[in-house]
Image: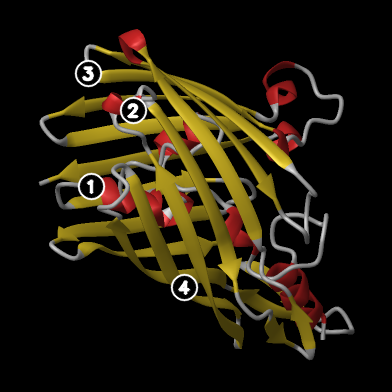
Amino acid sequence: MKLRALFALTFFVPLSAAAQESASFLKLGVGARAMGMGGAYTAVADDVNAMYWNPAGLAGLTQRSVGATHADLFANTRYDFFGYAQPTRFGTLGASAAYLSQAPLSGRSDTGVPMGNYDAADTAVNLSYAAAISAVPGLGLGGTMKYISSSIADASAQGYAFDVGVRYAPPAASGFGGAAFGLTVQNVGPGMRCLNQTAPLPLTVAGGVAYLLPFGFLLAADYKYRPYDHPGEASFGAEYQLLTSFALRAGYDSGSVTSNGESGFAALSGFTAGLGIKCRGYSVDYSVAPMGELGSAQRISLAALF
């Protein structure tokens, strides 16, 4: 049946034909702030979205935090993320979930007979923990466990993975105040198997640096290594904070470049932009990323500290 072939395509290579891997949706970034900075967030990771980028960043939270992101991607694909983090005496606990949904897909038999529409979806449910290392001020360690599920019509596959990360933000007294360094390994786990095929998860090793300059300028850079996809991806981001309540952002992600001779807005593939507003513990962020002939990916995030 063509439906089986369609599931194999959707499950194993939902986002790119660059490599055969399962659960590629795990590479989609979360948080409009992070995505507006080109995804250069491994070292920044100072909010609830750290559960995705670098769980060690949760160790720096001093208040309960809740956040949600909605993304409109290409081909009627939507991606949603929700996370909650709770600091305790023993470290910070976090729970989050991500859900990727696509417009109904048309199924046909091997003879071309229509078989109706089928829904396709990918889900990840995550539990995170991070703690500050008292012997080294500014150092945090963290990890995330993931349950992963992909489905289309009556076919499905499940799996699990974990992330580990470290983040170091030297105290001002060290002479390196304003700097931050991050390292994380994501999606470590066995490959997912379906329809007698097994494909690896999108293993990622990411390192990043960030530096907060005077007058609210934040600069960040990441390098990501993905053995089953692009051999290496560089991301750069900047944020300018105005009066602590308004921020402008821009970035570049080499792994998102899809431009192939397009002109105008489509030729800006790889570049990102965004803005954010904060007021009394609440924040709203927006980002946009051109994706060549696919259009653009837009994200909006809401978050609160309490």
Extreme residue toward the bottom, this view: 196
Cβ atoms at labels 3 and 2 below 8 Å apart? no
Work out whether mark 4 precedes mark 3 in sequence or the reverse, and give the earlier one: 4
Q: Secondary structure at mark 4?
A: strand
Three-letter amino acid code at the position of disc 4:
Lys
How far, Cα to Cα, is label 1 from label 4?
21 Å
Give the image location of residue 120, x and y in percent: 59, 71
Give the numbered dot on residue 61: 1
Work out whether mark 1 precedes mark 3 in sequence or the reverse, and give the earlier one: 1
Residue occupied by mark 2: 174
Residue 39: image quadrant is top right
Compared across the picture, whether 208 is left or right of 277 comes to right
Residue occupied by mark 4: 146
Work out whether mark 1 precedes mark 2 in sequence or the reverse, and give the earlier one: 1
- Quick one: label 3, few (<14), some, or many (20+) residues within 10 Å? few
Q: Nearer the viewer, mark 1 or mark 2?
A: 2
Q: Going 31% across and 44% down the picture, which residue do you hit?
A: 47
Q: Going 28% across and 33% down the picture, which residue do you hit?
A: 284
Question: Which one is in front, 218 or 80?
Answer: 218
Residue occupied by mark 3: 244
Q: Nearer the viewer, mark 3 or mark 2?
A: 2
